[in-house]
Amino acid sequence: MLVMAYGRSYGLPVITTRGNNVYGPNQFPEKLIPKFILLAMRGKVLPIHGDGTNVRSYLYCEDVAEAFEVILHKGEVGHVYNVGTKKERRVIDVAKDICKLFSMDPETSIKFVENR
């Protein structure tokens, strides 16, 4: 809202994008997917806050970059573009998939910890 107000007030060509849960190379290691991959690479336990049923949608960085490029060239000034997917995954399922990729037993490799 602040950016849109600034754009309106000063006549700046503002386009807003909203993307979430982006993953890919060089991502901060505290985010879910890189954190789990780094832990799995070391044979460590994957900690899940709560019961792991919270649902998220994940976007690969190259897909988001492609969306930004399309918006940059074809988007309309003053508009807001949500970049996302309808495919959602539970955190527990992401953890199980990473366990499978690293040949780890999910029963012993996933630990449920107290919710933040």
Image (cartoon, rainbow, N blue to C red):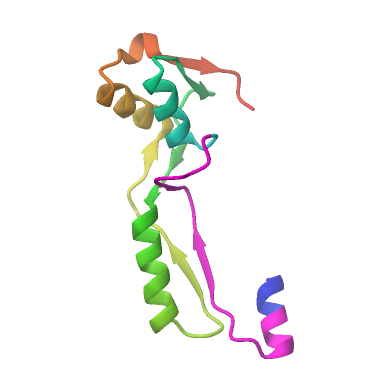
Q: Residue furthest bottom?
A: 11
Q: Residue at x 43, y 63 (%)?
A: 83
Residue 80 locus on image (x, y percent): 52, 74
Residue 78 locus on image (x, y percent): 56, 83
Residue 23 locus on image (x, y percent): 42, 46
Q: Residue at x 64, y 86 (%)?
A: 12
Q: Quadrant of residue 97?
A: top left
Q: Is residue 38 left or right of residue 105?
A: right
33 lies above or below 44: below
Q: Quadrant of residue 64?
A: bottom left
Is residue 24 within the magenta segment? yes
Q: Which residues are magenta?
A: 6-29
Q: Nearer the viewer, residue 53 or 91?
A: 91
Q: Residue at x 46, y 45 (%)?
A: 26
17 lies above or below 72: above
Q: Quadrant of residue 75?
A: bottom left
Q: Nearer the viewer, residue 111 or 38?
A: 38
103 lies above or below 78: above
Q: Residue at x 67, y 83 (%)?
A: 7
Q: Is residue 2 left or right of residue 90?
A: right
Placement of the C terminus among the 4 image quadrants = top right
